[in-house]
Amino acid sequence: MRKVIHIDVDAFFASVEQRDRPYLIGKPVIICNINSGRGVVSTASYEARKYGVHSAMPVFRAKKLCPRGYFIAPDFDKYQTASNQLYSILYQYSDLVEGAGLDEAYLEVNPNKKGIPSATWVAQDIRYQFYKETGLTASTGVSSNKLVAKIASDFQKPNGLTVVRPEEAAAFLKNLPIRKMPGIGPVTESYCHSLNIKKIGDLLRYDIQVLEEFFGNSAGYYLSSAQGIDDRPLVTYSEPKSCSIEDTLGADILGKEAALPIMESIAKRLEIRLAEDDYCGKTITIKVKYEDHSLTTRRQTLVSVASDWRTIYDVSADLLDKTQINTRPARLLGIGVSQLYENNLAPPIQLKLFE
Ligand code: TTP
Ligand code: MG
């Protein structure tokens, strides 16, 4: 029998900031771009959620709901580090790990690398290790498939562990609000409500034919999900979609002439990196971060593929003209190559009749 764990760090960005600034513990913390008047909330601590603040809410609204909240800018390097720690713990237990974001993953643990007989023990172990190493808590769901494991990990957030045995799955799901089913967003939710489908179990009142009238192609997914059935395997490996290198500069630079040697150095390193995996790419993107941390990217898609530094450099140099590099000091430069192909599988050059 499959045993699947879904793990999701609690209030991820906000928890990292609370960990690193103890005066924030127990306080409403809202992570957002504080300099932008039109930004949205990345996440909110559970204390802030009590005021109704949540991810993707405009910051001005969060300020109205929670005027005494601590509004803090994100620090992605720290989140990346914590994410790496999470994944390296997960790989100690299983190679079948499907990442679902920085703070979220599935893993198959029957069998697992430590020979632990119970998936629940594995989940407890992982939670303990993760807390010990990072000071952060994560909620986990344990089940025999991805769908139920994911819903279970959300069931007792924060810092929860919920185990749903296969024979209990339909009963577990029955009384949950329809919105808890992955794939049902606010629009489908209100459509379901208009059909008097409020809980996941309400779907089971209908035959598949009726559900097809309601939901078209998704009917089969809804019906099997409501029964707790999900055969999707874990997707453990995905081709890299891009390859990029960026340099944070020791001192800010101004002007294209100053930027070119750095772009050349990055292009040469990219050539080496692409060669290691035998890749070539079709799109080149440059990135310039100015002294005030605002970011510009410019991209160009090539007629053919490229993997040599000279082409990458030439295109990047042209793209620099579309930035404000001559008028605004820059603190970071980067180049990325995307739409990657393995060298021997690259598409033939497409000749354009009209440019
Ligand atoms: P989530 O796991 O969705 O949220 P969370 O970890 O903050 O809270 P929960 O306890 O409910 O799991 O997302 C992980 C991080 O991703 C989150 O801390 C911030 C970021 N994020 C955004 O920047 N914007 C968004 O709209 C969402 C949903 C998340
Ligand atoms: Mg999370």
Image: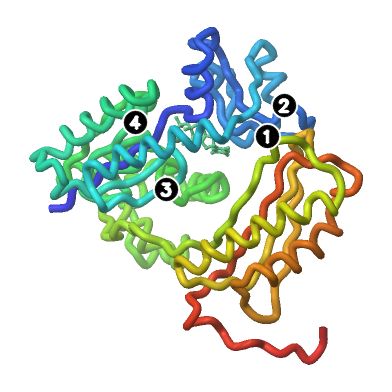
Task: State whether residue 227 appears in this view.
Answer: no
Q: Which mark is residue 34?
A: 2
Q: Is 149 on the left or on the right of 216, as rendered?
A: left
Q: CA distance from mark 3 to mark 2?
A: 27 Å
Residue occupying the point 59% across, 72% down: 307
Q: Is 127 on the left or on the right of 310, as rendered?
A: left
Residue picked out by circle 3: 100
Mark 1 residue type: Val
Residue occupying the point 34% across, 43% down: 150
Q: CA distance from mark 3 to mark 4?
A: 14 Å
SS class of the residue under badge 1?
loop
Dot placed on the residue nearer the N-terminal end, 1 or 3? 1
Q: Residue furthest top?
A: 23
**In the rendering, at what x and y percent does residue 130 appear?**
32, 29
SS class of the residue under badge 2?
loop
Mark 3 residue type: Ala
**In the rendering, at what x and y percent does residue 203 appear?**
36, 51
Query: Is the residue at mark 4 in contact range of ligand 1, meaning its CB lies under 8 Å from it?
Result: yes
Which is closer to the viewer, label 1 or label 3? 3
For label 2, the crowd category at 10 Å Cα-Cα, with few meaning under 14, some 14 to 19 and many 20 or more, is some
Q: Nearer the viewer, residue 206 or 28?
A: 28
Residue picked out by circle 4: 139
For label 1, the crowd category at 10 Å Cα-Cα, with few meaning under 14, some 14 to 19 and many 20 or more, is many
Residue picked out by circle 1: 40
